[in-house]
Amino acid sequence: MAGEKIPGTLNLVLLAGAIGIAAALLGIASHAVSGWAVLAAALTFSYVNNTVFSLLHESVHGIFHENKTVNAFSGMLAAAMTPTGLTFQRVFHLSHHARNRTVDEQFDYFRPGDSRLLKRAQWYGILTGIYWVFLPLGCLVYLAAPWVFRLRALRSRDGLLGRQTGAAAMFAGLDRADRTRMRLEILFSAAFQVFLVLLLDLTFAGWLACYAAFAINWSSLQYADHAFSPLDVKNGAWNLRVNRVVQWFFLNYHHHRAHHQHPSVPWIHLPRYVDFNEPRPSFLRVYLSMWLGPRPLPRDA
């Protein structure tokens, strides 16, 4: 497991190709005359940019490339297309691995004392893509006013917002991160986005169409691979069944239980860690069931 070979060269080719295609799709959406062409470009972008995000995910775990410098710079490029910051993303994602399906991450269940309004707002924010907005917005807030992440309302587990949203647990990781590095990476992502706008003469409407489609597509998977799964840190995820083409766009991201059980295994090897004889729910079935909203906490939880 620890000796699984990292497909570094393949990852570099995929990253370069995916960023190039994603940038071209942003240009098409910005300059297309037909609304159908804009829609097609945006939908395609939503999948191609998920390939970029999946490679960012590899970099976050340090398994994009064996060379740490290449891993970091590639992660910065992938983060710039999301857009977020590499270290910013790493803080939150590794915190997710540590707290998966604990009381800090049970967004699919109504727990005693929960605000049902806040729970539903979070839930449907995920399903509609609003959740994605917090990535670039959170980076900009951290850049301009990092003190916001230290507000008592967000940090206190005694408060409804800090406890129920998981913010108290998630934001604690920021205290241990390199603040200067985080700011520089966020500035890099912002500069990269500006570079794309100037290079391709992007319009706000074209950019927004592509990223709105990406937000919905990205958000739909970010919790479907956990929704209603066992309340267990390592096993609290699904190995979802999905169309093979989609699976390759997402670089086996749907094999999510295998990833949580073996986070150091590169994406290309994950199928070997999936038991294809045990039941695997379909992504579509889980996703559609999510629209019914959060459920009461199981009696045996």
Image (cartoon, rainbow, N blue to C red):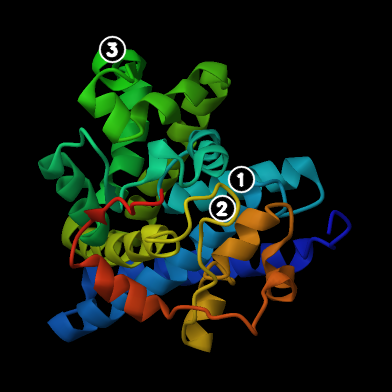
- Note whether residue 144 is visible: yes
Residue closer to the observer: 291 or 177: 291
Tag 3: residue type?
Arg
| Category of crowding for the residue at label 3, using alpha-carbon neighbours closer than 10 angstroms: few (below 14), some (14–19), many (at least 20) | some
Residue closer to the observer: 264 or 236: 236
Point out the frontmost of discs 2 and 3.
3
Q: For the view shown, which residue lies furthest in the right direction?
A: 3
Tag 1: residue type?
Val
Label 2 secondary element = helix
First in sequence: mark 3 vs mark 1: 1
- Note whether residue 34 is visible: no
Q: Are marks 2 and 1 in contact (CB under 8 Å)?
A: yes
Q: For the view shown, which residue lies furthest in the front direction?
A: 300
Q: Are marks 3 and 1 in contact (CB under 8 Å)?
A: no
Assign the N terminus to one quadrant of the image: bottom right
Q: Quadrant of residue 276?
A: bottom right
Q: Which numbered marker is on residue 60? A: 1
Q: Which numbered marker is on residue 152? A: 3
Q: Quadrant of residue 274?
A: bottom right
Residue 289 sits above or below residue 152 on the image: below
